[in-house]
Amino acid sequence: MKDIITLGIESSCDETSVAVVKNGREVLSNVIDSQIKIHEQYGGVVPEIASRNHVEAISRVTHRALEEANIKFEDIDHIACTYGPGLVGALLVGVSYAKALSYTLNIPLIGTNHIQGHIAANYITHKDLEPPFLCMIISGGHTHLVYIKNYIEFEILGKTRDDAIGEAFDKVARVIGLGYPGGPKIDKLAKEGIPNIQLPKSRFDNLDFSFSGIKTAIINLHHKNPEINRADLCASFEENVTQVLLDNVLKAVKQLDIKKVALAGGVSANTYIREKFMELEKTHNMKVYYPTPILCTDNAAMIASAGYYNFINGKRSDLFLNAIPNLKLGEET
């Protein structure tokens, strides 16, 4: 059987990434040009600056990815690019570049959902992982509990009603003076603290999430007591939101009678969340998966993997493909 080579392109936010992946799971290259240092001074991603930097980087990053993979453009079988969700200007850079390559090389174009990419990151790290399984997608823009029926069919069981969990991490970090990006900084400081501060948990009859309440509680606590122990506050915040995630996952496991759970998205790199999810393997006789840290954040290898499964299942995009900033999982065209 002939190997299938996928060129993946990711530009949904502030990483310009291009990857070459063989047969959906073997990464030949995964080049990531991050803009974190640029946006740090603004306390968050500035969309116009992100778009401009994507334009400057995408060709250079593509050629480097091909060089590291030791292949030529003619060796590529198809192109997978993120077309949503994300920042519209940033997405358009990757989509436009992918369409130009597809036309020039006369090879198929596969528009790929960014969230599907995060799920697929697990296929790269865990060669044995196959659907069905549950996936807890936790990132700066999303908090989704998803039933992965097969490689291209998904059922969203629960999602956030307000802030995504990564957004809550960033806002809490900003309030207590840690700066941007908040997730890694809270993770680091929490290791020095004790989770001894009572914080509210939002619960629903279904499997939805809400993180605006805990964010507001921390803002009020810090306003009333600016000298509050920040390490304890970070530890308490992490314990609180992790328990909310675990509670919903265990409900879903019981409902579906499934024993495989995966983490995905930037927040899945959080060491405390990983540790608590791994405990499920002993306490509930489950198998827990999560990507290597480099595959948790935005990267093109995960897009190439998801694109590969779309490709072998017959999905194709035409040259009218456009960026869809609010694209939902399962609503791909």
Image (tube, grey):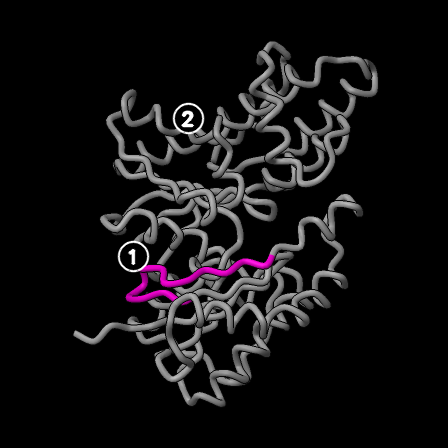
Instruction: Identify which residue is drawn at 31% across, 66% down.
Output: 22
> 209 or 4, which is in the foreground?
4
Q: Is residue 29 magenta?
A: yes
The amino acid marked with disc number 1 is Asn
- Looking at the picture, how far across and down is residue 277, in whole percent? 39, 29
Q: Residues within 10 Å of mark 1 (few under 14, many from 20)?
A: few
Magenta: main secondary structure equals strand
> Looking at the image, is 26 positioned above or below residue 286?
below
Label ID, residue 150: 1
> 201 or 206, which is in the foreground?
201
Name the element at disc 1.
loop
Question: Which region shows up in magenta?
Answer: 20-33
Name the image quarter holding residue 71.
bottom left
Q: Residues within 10 Å of mark 2 (few under 14, many from 20)?
A: few
Label ID, residue 13: none
Compare marks 1 and 2 and give the one earlier in the sequence: 1
Q: Quarter of the image for the N terminus: give it.
A: bottom left
Q: Which residue is mark 2?
A: 275
